[in-house]
Amino acid sequence: MTPAQSRAARALIEWTQPQLASAAGLGLSTVVDFEKARRAVSEEAVSAIQRALEGAGVIFVAENGEGPGVRLRKERP
């Protein structure tokens, strides 16, 4: 997952950074720093962010020659 995918995913589900931090069990600064690429965050933190977004209905699309992306599941939780 890239920082841009995280930002796009949040936009799709209308979550703020504080909402994502809470859902992922992380500090707000970790989410902010990851999404702004201010510093490298741990793989565990990135995984927690991705799991939280996936749990809210986001599907991460892998690089397929056109670049990575995100979309919503048809049926969201």
Image (cartoon, helix red, strand yellow):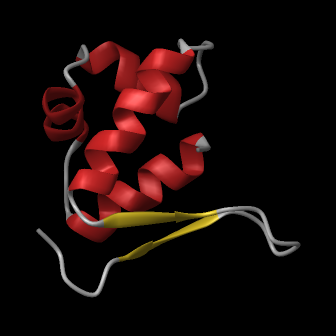
* Rendering coords of residue 19 (x, y %): 14, 39
> In this view of the protein, which residue sits in the foreground, 33 or 2?
2
From the viewer's perspective, is 10 left or right of 19?
A: right
Residue 20 to residue 57: above or below: above
Q: Quadrant of residue 68?
A: bottom right
Judge by depth and name the residue closer to the eye, 69 or 48: 48
User: Which residue is farthest bottom?
Assistant: 74
Q: Is residue 6 above or below residue 37?
A: below
Q: Quadrant of the N terminus?
A: top right
Task: List x then y, in percent, for residue 73.
Answer: 32, 78
Quarter that holds the C terminus: bottom left
Where in the figure is residue 51, as x and y percent of width and height?
Answer: 34, 41
Left or right, 73 with reference to 7: left
Indicate the quadrant where residue 75 lies.
bottom left
Number of numbered discs visible in the structure rendering: 0
x 35%, y 76%: residue: 72
Is 25 positioned to the left or the right of 50 in the image? left
Give the residue drawn at x 19%, y 53%: 15
Residue 19 higher or lower than 43, as above or below = below
Q: Residue furthest right?
A: 65
Residue at 28% x, 87% y: name it: 74
Q: Residue at x 36, y 29 (%)?
A: 48
Image coordinates of residue 67 in percent, x first then y, are 77, 66
